[in-house]
Image (cartoon, rainbow, N blue to C red):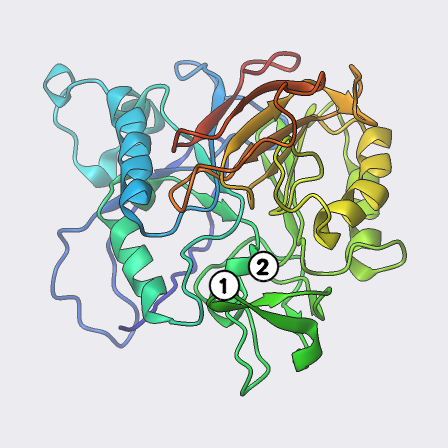
Amino acid sequence: RRLTQHSLGGIQSENSVYTTNRGLSGFQVISRTNVTTFLTPPAPGEWYPPPLDRSIKFAVLGDLGAYPHSRETVSKLEHNWVDHKINDDEIPEIRSEDLSAEDYHLRHGQGIDCILLAGDISYTNGDHSVWDDWLDMMSEFDFFKSVPLQIALGNHDLDYDPDTLDYALAYEHRFRMPQVQPAIRDLAPHELFHHHNDFKQAKDFLPYEYGNAYYSFTFGPSKHIVLSSYSSFLPGSTQYDWLLSELDSIDRSITPWVIVMLHCPLYSTFQIHQKEMYMTEALTHLEPILLQHVVNFVIAGHIHSYMRSVPTANFSPNPRGPIYIIQGNGGRNANEAYLNPTQEEWVHVRDHSMYGYGTLDLINVTHAK
């Protein structure tokens, strides 16, 4: 298959609607039936204005893959997006190229505005045809063609090749995130990986900076910082210094909501991965600066179950601490054992039996659900 990427210039924020079905220069367009329409987000610090005048809703999921339960999860997400549409018979017929923000809103109502996928996207284990299968599965759903997808790097996205010493090749080239600068990916010697079940598992930080590994973006009133669990975030590292700079630059009068996403959680109510370096080091080195900058939410995957904490600091409820979310039940599994039979005082809800996704709805500058 040929992978193509379109760069669209002159895109405006503030809820502009764009429609595209044009081919690339040098290629013959043989069909114009697959029309893609998308709504740009509000400008930084802004909300959807009247007549849209509504909250901003993110879908949160992780550890998706292309398994039977993965399709169920994506189908539920599609229904969430579609169920908020008004019947086309209730609004006049409008050509796609004439679609305004108001018309788009009538069609998509209170649906999902952006998808936050916290890593372990397709579970390829080095078989790059599985990436094609995953993208084919997602392309069957209309929302995937119209709603932006922001991703974090998971351990199953590394696709380490012991012959070439390369990794994250598909992750870096099949997606285009709002990069700080082009990726720096030095080759990874064998000692940085070990064989785990049917794939090569990283056992130390990788020489992978910028690109799709870590980046940030603003979506209306929310500032999003996406981190790499597998690039060093120790004090003095490139990612750590970049994170400090990003957090220091945030103007909470413009973006009152600060949301961090990474694959490996800092807090977990489940037995698995409790002593894994990527979690323990994050708790040691990242929690203090997340608390200092009053980050609102920290979204993770990695653990194939669901958890949401109360605002937490130092394993205790704290109103200035972030709410920690594990949404790793997208499709691979949903069956991790609890660390303790009774949930910890900082845990608001936990579940290890259901597949699915979550939503994060920003209502106004002080309330979210």
State yes or no: discs 1 and 2 in contact (Cβ < 8 Å). yes
| Pick the front one: 302 or 186 | 302
Q: Quadrant of the N terminus?
A: bottom left
Residue beneath disc 2: 212
Residue beneath disc 1: 171
Distance (Cα) linking label 1 and label 2: 8 Å
Residue 321 at x, y percent in the picture: 77, 23
**Which amino acid does the dot numbered 1 rest on?**
Tyr
Between discs 1 and 2, the one toward the N terminus: 1
Q: Relative to 190, does residue 293 appear above or below in the rendering?
A: above
| Pick the front one: 42 or 155 | 155
**Which amino acid does the dot numbered 2 rest on?**
Asn
Residue 138 at x, y percent in the picture: 29, 49
2 horizontally vs 246: left or right: left
Q: Quadrant of the C terminus?
A: top right
Q: Secondary structure at mark 1?
A: helix
Instruction: Please identify the quarter of the rendering in which residue 107 is found.
Output: top left
